[in-house]
Image: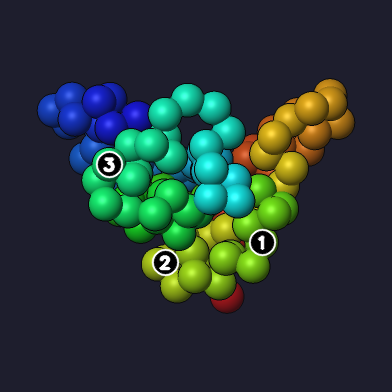
């Protein structure tokens, strides 16, 4: 996503969006679900984790959906100012896909 965010105006548009910005962590249990994300984090000198993803995008994301395996890290993500939801992000069944979509559509829970 970094190349897209590097396009002038995109990051600011997301940061100032009137609608919630929701991200699904591409890292599960310290590894990428797919693609080079974990490798890229390591090349930048950062251990791949949901906390690292949240820290990198905390200025533009309102809700970070993390995998159930990473639920123990939820408090650290929340400490960065993000709402957190857990789900089965490695979608193997239609039920997994439906549940993830429902969580994303629900959006962040307003702070009380």
Image coordinates of residue 25 in percent, x first then y, are 52, 43
Q: Quadrant of the C terminus?
A: bottom right
Q: What is the distance, in whole Å, between disc 2 and disc 3 at their CAs? A: 26 Å
Q: Indicate the secondary structure of the residue bearing disc 3.
A: helix
Residue occupied by mark 1: 71
Q: What is the distance, in whole Å, between disc 1 and disc 3 at their CAs? A: 25 Å
Q: Quadrant of the N terminus?
A: top left
Residue 15 sits in which quadrant? Answer: top left
Image coordinates of residue 39 in percent, x first then y, are 38, 37
Q: What is the distance, in whole Å, between disc 2 and disc 1 at their CAs? A: 16 Å
Residue occupied by mark 3: 43
Residue 58 sits in which quadrant? Answer: bottom left
Labelled disc at residue 81: 2
Q: For the view shown, which residue lies furthest in the left direction?
A: 8
The first of marks 2 and 1 along the sequence is 1
Image coordinates of residue 53 in percent, x first then y, are 41, 49
Image coordinates of residue 77 in percent, x first then y, are 49, 64
Q: Residue at x 21, y 40 (%)?
A: 12
Decide which of 94, 12 is in the foreground and name it. Answer: 94
The reply to whether residue 47 is visible in this rendering is yes
Q: Residue at x 74, y 30 (%)?
A: 91
Q: Is residue 80 above or below residue 43?
A: below
Q: Indicate the secondary structure of the residue bearing disc 2.
A: loop
The first of marks 2 and 3 along the sequence is 3
């Amino acid at each position: 996503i970094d190349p897209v965010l590097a396009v002038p105006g995109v990051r600011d548009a997301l940061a100032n969006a009137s609608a919630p910005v929701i991200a699904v962590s591409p890292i599960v249990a310290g590894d990428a679900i797919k693609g080079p994300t974990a490798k890229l984090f390591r090349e930048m000198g950062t251990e791949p984790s949901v906390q690292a993803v949240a820290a990198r995008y905390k200025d533009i994301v309102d809700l970070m959906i993390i995998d159930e395996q990473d639920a123990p890290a939820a408090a650290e993500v929340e400490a960065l100012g993000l709402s957190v939801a857990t789900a089965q992000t490695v979608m193997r069944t239609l039920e997994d896909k439906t549940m993830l979509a429902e969580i994303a559509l629900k959006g962040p829970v307003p702070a009380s």
